[in-house]
Structures are given as C-alpha cells and as structure tokens.
C-alpha cells in the first residue's frame, strides 16, 4: 500500500546497538507504539501526521534485542480512536503487552470489556495541540468515570506551559494518572526553576499521579552523543529525570517511545536510550522499581508480588 509519509518524516532506527546497560530481569518498556501496518490497519482520516509502518513483529524484535520482557503499547494519535492495531499487537503478545487506548464517549460497555480482555489497562487523554483536535472536558470526565470501575488509569500528554490551565482537571480525575514524558519540561530552564517546580508540586501533592521519565531525545537541547563519544547522550535531561526518580521512586515508569513519532532532527539509537537509564536511576534498587516493580504493579497487578 502506497501511503505518503509526512514530509521530513524520520523512520525508526533499523539497527539499534545492543545496550551496555543490562536491564533487570522482567523489565517493561512502558511507552511504545505500533503504526499500522497501514495496509492492514489504516491510519485515521483526522490524523495530524502520516508515519512509516512500525509493526508488532518489529516492536517485539526490538523488545528482545534490548532485553525487555514486556511492552506497554500506547495508542498513537495517527490511529485516532481506532484501537485495532493496538489490540492486535496485545493479543499477539502472549500477555507480554498491555495497552493504553483512545476511546470516545459513545463506546459501549461490551467494547470496553473486549479492550480489557485484550490487555488494555488505560486510556490516553492528549492535550498536545499539534497532535489532536480539542476534546471537551465533559467528554473526558465521562470517559474517566466509565473506565475507573475497570481498574484502568488515565495517561495524559501535555506541554509544560499548559499545566496551570490543566491542573484542576488532572487533580480531579478519579484514577491513577500517568503523565507522559515528565510533562515535557523545557530542559533549558533550571531544574529547580518555577516551571519544573510546578510539576514537582503536582507530584508531591497528589499521590495518585505518576510520570514516565522518558523521551530524553525529544526534550534534549544538547542532543545525542557527539561522534567522538565524549559527551553523554541527552545529558541536559538527566537532572530532571533523576530528580523525579529519586523523589518518587514508586511512581515512575520508563519507555523507549519507539518508533519515535515526529522527531525532526535525529532518530535515536534505542540501544543508547537504554544506556541512558543508569544516569537517571543510579542504584540497582531504583532501576528495579522503575523498570520492573512499578510497571508490573500498574499493568500486571495479578502477577506483582512486592
Ligand atoms: C509520543 C509523542 C508524540 C506522539 C504521540 O500519539 C502520538 O501521536 O504520542 C509526539 O509527537 O510528541 O509519546 O509518542
């Protein structure tokens, strides 16, 4: 099927390095996507970008290459509220993938149950204007009330400058709330400056709020390592992620964000992304919580023993 990708689209990295950091046994890549394949699972007409294909088989091959045991697959906006590619991947994973779906208020109880049976454990509310059209807050409140009894949570994606306006909505949600990519701070600002302090306050005051300390490649101004390898990759993101991991070790998650939609200047080597982890979770205990205990508690609670 011939589908024109968004101009300038960067495809995912076909030959990632093998990480030097050995992931703890049972690690979960808690933020990744599948795209299509478009011939089987067409992209949504209202999408804001058209990506390359990124199939479940390619995702599972990456999982094994990097040393992860499981995936949490997050519905990408290019598929709108059509969760078929996500469900197909979860079902094919042998219970090694859970899903976070996008649903509309008109979803029926039977469809919600069928998503649950496939492995969906959350919904994503996206507030990033370049990715989605506006959804009325009352619709989101209604959806949150529908999914709460299933034991699901809400994943929210927004940019740091929008947090003040979204604060009351987030803090009234009745479920666990997981914030994507640390609320997208501007890492050019001080880690103890007002913008990131606001996010730290959100975490401190609301024990139901978790965050993914993910996407250094998206947030960084300093970028990937220089070719001579002298500079650590994405070093300007380290203080932000490390601060969260150390302050809230039981409420942080990590994911690759493969296949890395909408990156404009470089495509990360997923092996190097894994090598970023010991810079933000510096002890074996913090690493185990970030990569194993926390995602297991949220997505596979029936198997979680701690
Ligand atoms: C991410 C980030 C992005 C895209 C999406 O669903 C999506 O389309 O999440 C982005 O463009 O910042 O987490 O994958």
Image (tube, rainbow, N blue to C red):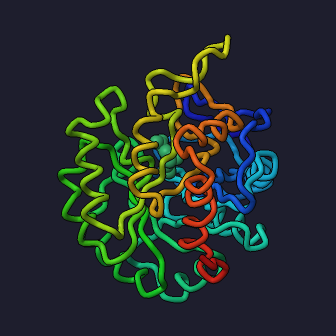
**Residue 158 placement, left or right of 33:** left
Residue 59 at least partly seen? yes
In the rendered view, tell whether residue 87 sits above or below residue 117.
above
**Residue 211 placement, left or right of 54:** left
x, y (%) of residue 257?
58, 46
**Residue 167 placement, left or right of 151:** left
Q: What's the residue at 66%, 62% (across, down)? A: 85
Q: What's the residue at 63%, 75% (across, down)? A: 119
x, y (%) of residue 275?
66, 37
- Nearest the eye: 40 or 184: 184
Q: Which quadrant of the structure image shows residue 206?
A: bottom left
Tell me the quadrant of the picture where the N terminus can be found.
Answer: top right
In the rendered view, tell whether residue 29 sits above or below residue 122.
above
Q: What's the residue at 24%, 54% (across, down)? A: 201
x, y (%) of residue 162?
24, 46
Residue 45 at least partly seen? no
């Amino acid at each position: 099927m011939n589908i024109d990708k968004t101009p300038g689209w960067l495809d995912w990295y076909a030959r990632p390095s093998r990480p030097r950091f050995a992931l703890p046994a049972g690690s979960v890549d808690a933020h990744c996507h599948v795209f299509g394949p478009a011939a089987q699972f067409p992209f949504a007409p209202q999408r804001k970008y058209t990506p390359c294909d990124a199939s479940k088989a390619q995702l599972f091959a990456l999982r094994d290459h990097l040393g992860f045991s499981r995936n949490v697959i997050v519905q990408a906006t290019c598929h709108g509220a059509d969760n078929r590619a996500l469900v197909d991947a979860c079902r094919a994973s042998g219970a090694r993938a859970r899903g976070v779906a996008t649903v509309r208020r008109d979803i029926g109880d039977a469809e919600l149950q069928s998503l649950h049976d496939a492995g969906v454990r959350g919904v994503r509310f996206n507030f990033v204007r370049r990715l989605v059209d506006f959804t009325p807050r009352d619709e989101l409140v209604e959806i949150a009330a529908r999914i709460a009894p299933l034991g699901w949570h809400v994943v929210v994606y927004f940019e740091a400058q929008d947090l003040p306006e979204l604060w009351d909505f987030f803090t009234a949600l009745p479920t666990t709330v997981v914030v994507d990519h640390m609320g997208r701070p501007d890492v050019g600002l001080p880690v103890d400056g007002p913008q990131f302090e606001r996010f730290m306050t959100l975490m401190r005051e609301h024990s139901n709020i978790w965050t993914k300390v993910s996407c250094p490649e998206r947030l960084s101004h300093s970028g990937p390592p220089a070719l001579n390898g002298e500079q650590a990759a994405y070093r300007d993101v380290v203080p932000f992620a490390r601060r969260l991991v150390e302050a809230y070790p039981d409420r942080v998650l990590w994911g690759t964000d493969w296949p890395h939609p909408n990156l404009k200047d470089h495509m990360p080597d997923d092996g190097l992304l894994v090598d970023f982890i010991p810079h933000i979770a510096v002890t074996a205990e913090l690493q185990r919580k970030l990569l194993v205990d926390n995602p297991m508690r949220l997505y596979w609670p029936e198997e979680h023993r701690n």
